[in-house]
Amino acid sequence: MATLILRRILIAIPTLLLVSLFVFALQRALPGDPFLVIAGEERDPEVIARLREIYRMDDPIFVQFFAWLGQVVQGDFGRSLRTGEPVLNLILQKLPVTIQLATASILVAICIGIPIGILAARRKGTVVDYSASAVALSGLSIPNFWFGIMLILLVSVHLKWLPASGYESIFEHPWEAIKRLIMPAFVLGNGLAAFLMRHTRSAMLEVLRSDYVRTARAKGLDEDAVVHRHALRNALMPIITLTTLLFGELLAGAVLTEQVFTIPGFGKLIVDAVFNRDYGVVQGVVLCTAIGFILMNLIADILYVLVNPRLRAG
């Protein structure tokens, strides 16, 4: 297990370097000067020159990149060009918000997608199977922002069951946080549940055709025991991969949903930073997102080993 983790960490280092370099270079290639906004209405050339000197913007791009990288290695992600606040502080303020939303969304997706996928596989070719496929296709087709707006109009404005927007920490005000999480988590989890359902159905159908499943049935085992004790365990392998990757995607992919429900998470932070050309914040958020994806892949590998001990030999 330790060897697996070490191997994945060593692979992650060049990945993070390439991602950081790509984002760094792409931002510098964009037209415009962020210091024209920071300098104010007068746009004093001396002020702009001083700001460029402070943030080393006149240095060659590779010098800027390795200077920033050296700071990151020491735990310093730099400062926001717009507010002057440390980027790491901004990330630590917004990250728990998005993690809370992502966790609730993935739980919704798991609770809906996996059971329906198993049921559709067991009832292949029946009305249940076709209905589940139609629902999954609908979940994939409906845009999150439109679904979110419709839910707000129906549940919050018309029925007045849940608050329309806002955020509360689950650790400070649990009940209020749950009420504010239900709609955005359902909006994000709806599309993810469709992905999980389709992959669960495919994985289960493949496993149910296996020889050992036919043998278990021939021995007279109950169908529920065959499905849950024998088939599901082996079908979990691709489902684990998909679930962990979807969770990593949620850290960066919840931008529109956070905007619709006015949730002050990573989405709002990255949108504001891109529009304001706040280089430090964009680089910090992208780097944290890349680390999140790598961690999710590592967790998937560890869960693989736990689900299938035969992989420990590899």
Image (cartoon, rainbow, N blue to C red):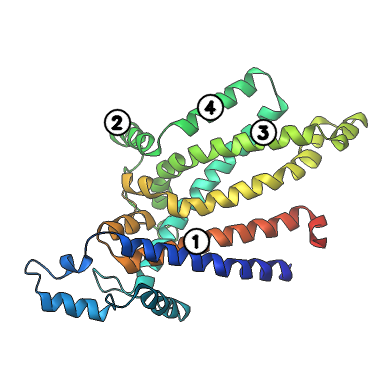
Residue bearing mark 1: 290
Secondary structure of the residue carrying numbered label 4: helix
Q: Quadrant of residue 78?
A: bottom left
Identify the amino acid type marked 4.
Answer: Val
Going from N to C along the chain, the mark reached first, 2 or 3, is 2
- Above or below, 155 against 50 in this view is above
Residue bearing mark 3: 201
Task: Report the residue at 60% width, 35% height from top.
Answer: 197
Residue bearing mark 4: 135
Going from N to C along the chain, the mark reached first, 2 or 1, is 2
Across and down, in percent, residue 204 comes to 72, 35
Secondary structure of the residue carrying numbered label 2: helix
- 93 displayed left or right of 104: left
Q: Residues within 10 Å of mark 4 (few under 14, many from 20)?
A: some
Going from N to C along the chain, the mark reached first, 4 or 1, is 4
Q: Quadrant of residue 228?
A: top right
Q: Nearer the viewer, residue 173 or 231?
A: 231
